[in-house]
Image (cartoon, grey):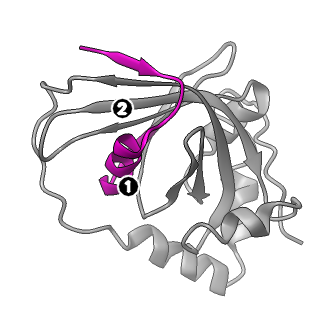
Amino acid sequence: MAKQFPRLDQRLTDFIQAQQIFFVATAPAAGRVNCSPKGMDSLRVLAPDRICWLNVTGSGNETAAHVLENGRMTLMWCAFAGPPLILRAYGTARTVHRLDADWEDLSAQLPQQPGARQIFDLKIELVQTSCGMAVPYFDFQEDRRLLSDWANKKEADGTLAAYWEEKNLVSVDGQPTGLPLPE
């Protein structure tokens, strides 16, 4: 049932690009494991062994803290329509911030989103597929606009940096996220 590959092929890349949601999992050496759903057309396959995704402002910044500590990341997609499939990409990620030299090159590959916080650049070390026969069917309706609207307001009134300072500089376990605050 499960199959492993060293990188993505075109069939798996097409599957990723057709999905409306993905999940990211990270963990520190000690502390809480984090698994978060992501959407908003924020992910791109850059090469068979490389994926990047734009992370927008949220109530926490666990992924950044874990990547800063050890880089381990797993991305997962599952088919909610059509033939069943679960796809995982395991690898090592790095965080790219607005002040980093390659921010412009990477962000040009992604749709611009209000509240953009960082880009995660994943070097794939293993791809695994599994059957997904127990994953239920769901129909996609539309992306929620709530986070975009909220981030637009925070950017417009100049309070996004204060929010980041309050909510996004350390993980729930008190580990630093490495997020630089805008000046």
- Crowd tier of the residue under label 2, counting other residues whose Cα lies within 10 Å: few below 14, some 14–19, many 20 or above: many
Q: Return the residue nearer the eye: 25 or 44.
A: 44
* Residue 90: percent from left, percent from top: 54, 26
* Residue 49: percent from left, percent from top: 59, 38
Residue farthest toward the bottom in the current orientation of the protein: 156
Q: Which stretch appears magenta?
A: 1-23
Q: Earlier in the sequence, mark 1 or mark 2?
A: 1
Q: Secondary structure at mark 2?
A: strand
Which residue sits at x=50%, y=56%?
43
Which residue sits at x=58%, y=67%?
110
Q: Return the residue nearer the eye: 165 or 22.
A: 22
Image height of 85 relative to 42, above or below: above
Which residue sits at x=13%, y=48%?
138
21 part of magenta stretch:
yes
Q: Quadrant of the C terminus?
A: bottom right
From the image, tell me which residue sits under label 1: 17
Q: Quadrant of the N terminus?
A: top left
Which residue sits at x=74%, y=24%?
70
- Crowd tier of the residue under label 1, counting other residues whose Cα lies within 10 Å: few below 14, some 14–19, many 20 or above: few
**Left or right, residue 61 beside residue 161:** left
18 part of magenta stretch:
yes
Q: Quadrant of residue 141?
A: bottom left
Q: Secondary structure at mark 1?
A: helix
**Left or right, residue 89 beside residue 124:** left
Label count reads: 2
Numbered tag placed on residue 110 in the rendering: none
Q: Identity of the amino acid at label 2?
A: Leu
* Residue 134: percent from left, percent from top: 13, 25
From the image, tell me which residue sits under label 2: 87
Do residues under tags 1 and 2 come within 8 Å of each other at their CB atoms?
Answer: no
